[in-house]
Image: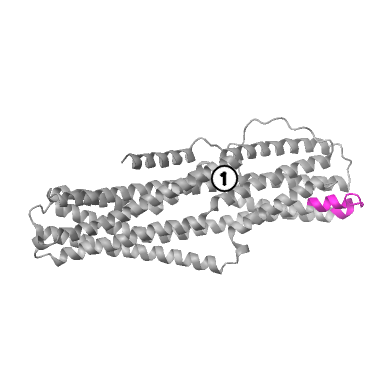
């Protein structure tokens, strides 16, 4: 009992940490930025900060899906084992009750106790699985902290970079006032608009990546707590029924098993909706009010494409041989940033569609299984508290509840197996280079290469 309480306390503390203590407010103090000597130096400094901010955003997206494939496989193993054992235990208990319906006194007590123990084993598997996954997530957090890529460190760095970019853009306005009118001035003004657009889209992209990671982790920790609580309620109720039966305490003492199933079944019915709502709420709670919406980001990206085309048309007139390499570097960097941002926005739409599909599929399986468990709990409670001295009616109620619960969990197990099979088929058919984690890693490599090219460029 102490170990179970400690696990619940630990998971609760993790969830509370996910929701508190970390803000994405962009107004924070930062050291003054040294003024750039030339417009080229200013452009280089802004581009370097924006590339680093984009790297941070991409890394957060990668962290949000890190280990997701194997985590899903492990969770399927826990869930499917629980569901299979529950089906066997519930159907054995339910069918056995009907077999001895007219001769309750001849029913072997060990048979029903063994059926109940199968359900208790199923509950223990899910509780143990939640503890394992919670421990693995805790170790992942420690590793990220050692590597300096934990959320507080990344958010602090992102705030500094955004304020550096804002100060550099202000300095750029002052530097452009001394540039003579002409084609070069027009080209610099176009670059300024590109850099400003890029800054606004990057701020929204980082906020969305941050919110996504917070939402995914908060929902996952709540899932561990919810599964632990549901299985603890169901398992403790079943165990109390076994103890009452073995010690011949009477039907009323076995009614706790029905109460436990009522609580557990109700929790199972609403679990997918509660977990999905937690994910969405965590994303929106941490989202600053002054960042661009998804539609505004799309419009900004279209405007950015137009500005890049305009800049490309002006470069021929501005290039006199010396700066051609620098101008080519700037064009490649701007195009890369636009491409990565467009991919992030496209992935966001795909993620929203996938979230809705998963919720509908999980809600069906959990709803059927949870509702049938609720029915079983009601039947057991009625049998124990209403028909204390009528073993025939009590056995009939237990039999109805057990068979209903077993068939409901059979549907839930089938849904779990179907979802995991489809996921494995999709993974098998998908080329490795098109996997989400592979795309994000490729983006990180390109951004890091762009930063190296920026450092080596003689002009920008």
- Magenta stretch: residue 201 in it? no
Give the answer, above or below, for where 15 lies relative to 71.
Answer: above
**Total marks in image:** 1
* Tag 1 secondary structure: helix
Query: Which segment did they paint magenta?
Result: 315-330
Whether residue 85 is visible to the viewer of this picture, yes or no, is yes
* Frontmost residue, 179 versus 437: 437
Q: Residue at x 74, y 51 (%)?
A: 449
* Frontmost residue, 245 versus 426: 245
Residue linked to disc 1: 210
* 166 lies left or right of 274: right
Q: Residue at x 15, y 58 (%)?
A: 109
Image position, residue 41 (x, y; %): 81, 40
- Magenta stretch: residue 321 in it? yes
Q: Residue at x 74, y 47 (%)?
A: 451
* 211 lies left or right of 164: left
* 36 lies left or right of 446: right
């Amino acid at each position: 009992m102490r170990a179970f309480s400690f696990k619940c306390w630990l998971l609760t503390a993790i969830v509370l940490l996910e929701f508190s203590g970390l803000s994405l407010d962009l107004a924070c103090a930062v050291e003054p930025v040294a003024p750039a000597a030339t417009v080229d130096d200013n452009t280089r400094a802004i581009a370097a900060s924006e590339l680093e901010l984009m790297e941070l955003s991409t890394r957060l997206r990668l962290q949000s899906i890190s280990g997701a494939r194997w985590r899903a496989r492990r969770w399927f193993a826990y869930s499917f084992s629980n569901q299979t054992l529950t089906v066997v235990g519930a159907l054995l208990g339910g069918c056995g009750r009907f077999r001895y319906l007219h001769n309750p006194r001849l029913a072997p007590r060990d048979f029903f106790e063994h059926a109940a123990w199968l359900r208790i084993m199923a509950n223990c598997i899910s509780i143990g699985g939640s503890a394992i996954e919670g421990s693995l997530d805790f170790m992942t957090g420690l590793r990220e902290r050692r590597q300096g890529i934990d959320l507080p460190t990344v958010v602090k760095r992102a705030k500094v970079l955004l304020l550096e970019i804002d100060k550099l853009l202000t300095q750029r306005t002052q530097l452009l006032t001394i540039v003579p009118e002409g084609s070069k001035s027009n080209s610099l003004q176009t670059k300024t608009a590109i850099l400003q657009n890029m800054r606004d889209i990057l701020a929204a992209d980082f906020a969305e990546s941050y919110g996504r990671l917070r939402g995914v982790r908060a929902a996952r920790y709540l899932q561990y707590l919810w599964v632990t609580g549901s299985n603890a309620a169901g398992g403790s109720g079943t165990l109390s029924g076994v103890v009452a039966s073995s010690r011949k305490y009477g039907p009323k003492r076995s009614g706790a098993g029905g109460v436990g199933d009522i609580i557990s079944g109700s929790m199972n019915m609403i679990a997918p909706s509660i977990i999905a709502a937690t994910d969405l709420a965590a994303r929106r709670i941490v989202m600053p009010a002054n960042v661009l919406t998804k539609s505004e980001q799309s419009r900004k990206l279209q405007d950015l494409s137009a500005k890049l085309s305009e800049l490309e048309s002006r470069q021929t007139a501005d290039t006199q041989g010396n700066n051609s390499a620098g101008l080519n570097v700037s064009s490649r960097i701007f195009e890369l940033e636009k491409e990565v941002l467009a991919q992030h926005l496209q992935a966001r739409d795909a993620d929203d569609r996938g979230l809705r599909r998963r919720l509908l599929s999980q809600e069906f399986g959990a709803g059927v299984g949870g509702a049938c468990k609720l029915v079983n709990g009601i039947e057991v409670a009625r049998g124990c508290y209403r028909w204390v001295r009528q073993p025939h009616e009590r056995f009939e109620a237990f039999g109805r509840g057990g068979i209903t619960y077993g068939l409901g969990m059979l549907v839930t197990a089938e849904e779990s197996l179907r979802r995991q099979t489809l996921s494995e088929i999709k993974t098998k058919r998908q080329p490795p280079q098109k996997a989400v984690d592979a795309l994000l890693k490729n983006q990180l490599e390109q951004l890091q290469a762009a930063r190296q090219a920026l450092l080596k460029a003689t002009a920008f």
